[in-house]
Image: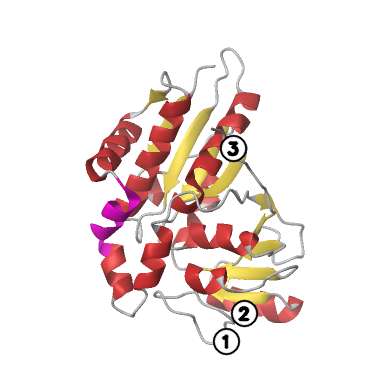
Amino acid sequence: MFRRVSVALTKPLVHAQPNDVCIAIDVLRATPILAVLFDRGCSAVWLAADADAARGAGRASGRLICGEQGGLPPPGFDHGNSPVEFSRLDLAGREVVFATSNGTGTLRPCAPGQHEYAGAFVNLSAVVQTALRALDTLSAPGEEGRLLIACAGTHDQFSIEEAACAGLMVREVLRTDPDAALDDAAEAAHRLYESFGSPEAALQAAGNASRLSDPGLAEDVLFCAQLDITEIVPELSVAAPGSIGSQEPRWPLSLAGATA
């Protein structure tokens, strides 16, 4: 099976095609939180465009309202954007409306693809193996699909932690398929990760990690540097019209076991 792998190093470079399988990454902190929410029993996560939309949708439905603006919880939110906080909650059967200023927006340009998953260091092996299995079901001779790894970046600018996570995902692909064809950005991300050698080292070099340390959120950085602590892989699907809005995406639960 011939596999192609592309990396979009910032959100404006994400151009998903109909036969793509996409992994969206926002290491600090949106995509780790999505995995944690489901790990704690959450039944669905609904993405809102901004804090006002999240408040309106949450009040109308009784869902928890969670997320951040400028790294901190907006007024009226039940919880913020801390994976450590969510990892200590019992969310069995609860639905969440989630809004962040940066990361969740990376999923929207991935939506033209066949599958869109949320990935990070915390579920890295599981999300890559899930994506590869999905890619193999789509590929046919002359119509090979592509794995597109989409980095959120920071306000459309390059971020080391996303690129390094993408590079480790590329390494996981190559572990499974040494003959996978990498584009230049995938090759660069792979070499970037190899220069660090661990998620912790990559995050220590990231400007976003130092900014999260300022308001006392260093524990979240350490949490997001953990590798393969869950096998949960959230996947994007289209929401029913009238739920939050006809164009709002929904995250149903998808469980995946990492392949040895």
Q: Does residue 88 appear in this view?
A: yes
The residue singled out by tag 2 in the image is 55
Q: Nearer the viewer, mark 3 or mark 2?
A: 3
Q: Is residue 205 magenta?
A: yes
Which quarter of the picture shows residue 39? Answer: bottom right
Would residue 232 be found to the left or right of residue 157 on screen?
Answer: right
The span shown in magenta is 198-207
- State how many labels appear: 3
Q: Does residue 159 appear in this view?
A: no
Task: Categorize mark 1 by other alpha carbons within 10 Å: few (<14), some (14-19), many (20+).
Answer: few
The residue singled out by tag 1 in the image is 76
Q: Residue at x 49, y 82 (%)?
A: 74
Instruction: Specify which label sits upstream in the sequence, 1 or 2.
Output: 2
Q: Residue at x 68, y 77 (%)?
A: 58
Which quarter of the picture shows residue 240? Answer: bottom right
Q: CA distance from mark 1 to mark 3?
A: 36 Å
**Above or below: residue 4 compared with residue 158:** above
- Amino acid of disc 1: Gly
